[in-house]
């Protein structure tokens, strides 16, 4: 172990704690004042200035290996190896004479594609977080364990932009050649999780596997459904279905053998969490769960899930087996249904639409949704955004690489693809529109999974070029066509046309086949 640490310049550590139990990590966190226990047993921590991801602070080393592999631009911002090495040296010096917490874990439930990932933390609470999020090796699997990638998280180290040539005190630096990630200056643990996801998105396409930012569940007959979408669109909520087994809530791979979870835990948004709407997630809030930025009464230790005073992006991390019907070890058959979730802030997208292969590629590449307040740093109200493949910040390769993998598997296995809007209808968010209820969305998802939308009549929307069902069990037919919900039809047409133009303008950046472009909105 000492040689492994010295390899990354980590010498003279005060204490090195490797693969501690959850109870031990909780004890260390409490002793260091990093968190407090809630009445339900969860460890509650506050992440300070950074309560969400900081995508503008992420950089990737550009060298001879990565120069022609990475899709360089606003997402994958290059940094030189010399710059990376200089920061790495300063971080290593900072970590001297400090306690280090190490977790040796797996990413990928399928042994064919599994990766050994070692995480080295300055804070035991963050080490507990990633222990609960990744796949936890059995004792015998740790014998001879050798990490392929290493992630070092030092939230107490503050970058100096003018010295370190970064944008702020926080920085996430990815070095694919040296298989090392550095995370500094941010206490938001989600950066660690998403660094693992970035690694898998880099590796798997070269092996013919399709890495996906999606949740997955499975019915009694082995029918698997995938739910794509950015944070806040409902991946975790909708996949936690008491009538289906949960494969995973956020990150998966798709191969000829089926799907597999990258993780061994869940990272759920818990703003306005209630037992009535999300009973499985509610019950997962117990000892072993870690809550980020959830308001708590320090005397009674009661949690207030409705309080947004710290951030709207309150989070809960817990092992997947806290969900009663979790499907372990996190693998399943080829999916029969693929669902794209979008939270349309303009209130003009239909609650559900069926997609052709080309439409699936178009709307997958577009990755349209509304970034909800707090999910990303600097976002204070819902904003329309386009995030390629519903996960642009984590995609090292060009979007078409992932879209081609989607098309390949959808076509090969005949999977049905749907677009489901979990956002607003009847008008824009905050300006007359109403958020589609979880109850209605669940009814739509149930109809899709039960194949009840296979035989209904569809009409083509002239603006978005989508096929909308005229009926759906358990749903008022009026809400299925968004135009019906607007009192001012001209205002609807104007708003829908404006969004269609936004789709078209965003899509100009992609070099894709003509038939895919033509499958998109007409305006």
Image (cartoon, grey):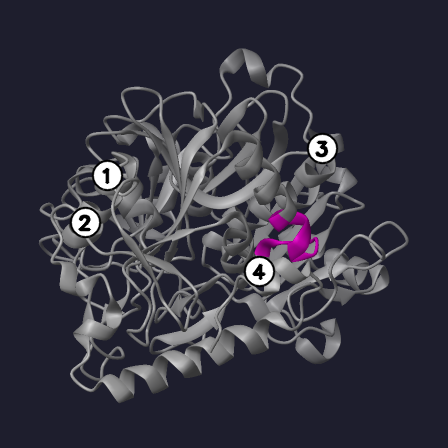
Query: Mark 4 sits on what residue?
Result: 393
Q: CA distance from mark 4 to mark 2?
A: 35 Å
Q: Is 482 or 424 nearer to us in this picture? A: 482
Mark sitting on residue 182? none
From mark 2 to mark 1, how far is it between C-alphas?
A: 8 Å
Q: Give x and y (percent) for residue 77.
A: 71, 67
Q: Which residue is mark 2?
A: 472
Element carrying mark 3: helix
- Nearer-N-terminus badge (1/3): 3
Category of crowding for the residue at label 2, using alpha-carbon neighbours closer than 10 angstroms: few (below 14), some (14–19), many (at least 20): some
Q: CA distance from mark 4 to mark 3?
A: 21 Å
User: Of the numbered discs in the image, which one, if any, rests on residue 452?
Assistant: 1
The residue beneath circle 3 is 207
- Earlier in the chain: of badge 2 and badge 1, it is 1
Residue 252: horizontal and vertical position, in percent? 50, 37
Q: Reading the chain from its start, which is encountered first: label 1 or label 4?
A: 4
Residue 9: image location, x then y, percent:
76, 46
Taking 245 as reference, is 279 above or below it? below
Kindly report the distance in space between the C-alpha atoms of the residues bearing marks 3 and 2.
40 Å
Classify mark 4: helix, strand or loop. helix
Which residue: 78% across, 39% down? 7
Which image quadrant: the N terminus? top right
Marks 2 and 1 close (CB-CB < 8 Å): yes
Specify the segment rendered in magenta. Answer: 394-403
Check residue 400 for magenta coloring: yes
């Amino acid at each position: 172990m000492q040689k492994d640490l010295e390899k990354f310049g980590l010498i003279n550590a005060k204490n090195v704690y490797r693969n501690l139990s959850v109870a031990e990590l909780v004890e260390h966190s409490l002793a260091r004042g990093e968190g407090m226990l809630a009445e339900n047993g969860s460890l509650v921590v506050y992440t300070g200035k950074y309560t969400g991801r900081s995508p503008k602070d992420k950089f990737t080393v550009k060298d001879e290996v990565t120069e022609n592999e990475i899709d360089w631009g606003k997402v994958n911002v290059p940094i030189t190896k010399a710059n990376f090495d200089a920061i790495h040296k300063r971080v290593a010096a900072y970590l001297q004479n400090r306690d280090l917490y190490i977790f040796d874990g797996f990413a990928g439930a399928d042994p064919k594609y599994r990766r050994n990932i070692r995480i080295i933390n300055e804070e035991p609470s963050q080490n507990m977080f990633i222990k609960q999020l990744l796949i936890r090796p059995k004792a015998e699997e740790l014998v001879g364990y050798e990490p392929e990638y290493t992630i070092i998280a030092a939230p107490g180290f503050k970058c100096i932009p003018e010295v370190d040539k970064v944008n702020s005190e926080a920085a996430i630096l990815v070095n694919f050649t040296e298989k090392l990630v550095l995370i500094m200056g941010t206490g938001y643990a989600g950066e660690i999780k998403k660094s693992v996801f970035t690694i898998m998105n880099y590796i798997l396409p070269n092996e013919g596997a399709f890495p996906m930012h999606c949740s997955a569940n499975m019915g009694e007959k082995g029918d698997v459904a995938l739910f794509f979408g950015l944070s806040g669109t409902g991946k975790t909520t909708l996949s936690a279905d008491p009538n289906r087994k949960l494969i995973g809530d956020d990150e998966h791979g798709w191969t000829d053998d089926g799907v597999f979870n990258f993780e061994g835990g869940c990272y759920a948004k818990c703003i306005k969490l209630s037992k009535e709407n999300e009973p499985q997630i509610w019950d997962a809030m117990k000892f072993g769960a870690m809550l980020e930025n959830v308001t708590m009464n320090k005397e009674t230790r009661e949690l207030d899930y409705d309080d947004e005073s710290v951030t709207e992006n309150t989070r809960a991390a817990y092992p997947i087996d806290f969900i009663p019907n979790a499907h372990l070890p996190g693998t399943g058959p080829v999916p029969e249904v693929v669902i794209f979730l979008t939270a349309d802030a303009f209130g003009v997208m239909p609650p559900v639409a069926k997609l052709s292969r080309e439409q699936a590629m178009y709307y997958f590449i577009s990755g349209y949704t509304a970034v909800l307040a707090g999910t990303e740093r600097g976002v204070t109200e819902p904003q329309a955004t386009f995030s390629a493949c519903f996960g642009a910040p984590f995609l090292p390769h060009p979007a078409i690489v992932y879209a081609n993998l989607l098309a390949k598997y959808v076509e090969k296995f005949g999977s049905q693809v749907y677009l489901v809007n979990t956002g607003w209808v009847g008008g824009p968010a905050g300006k007359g529109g109403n958020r589609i209820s979880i109850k209605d969305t669940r009814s739509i998802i149930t109809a899709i999974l039960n194949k009840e939308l296979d035989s209904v009549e569809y009409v083509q929307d002239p603006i978005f070029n989508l096929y909308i069902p005229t009926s759906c069990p358990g749903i008022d037919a009026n809400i299925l066509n968004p135009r019906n919900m607007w009192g001012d039809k001209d205002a609807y047409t104007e708003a829908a046309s404006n969004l269609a133009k936004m789709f078209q303008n965003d899509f100009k950046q992609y070099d894709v086949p003509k038939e895919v472009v033509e499958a998109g909105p007409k305006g």
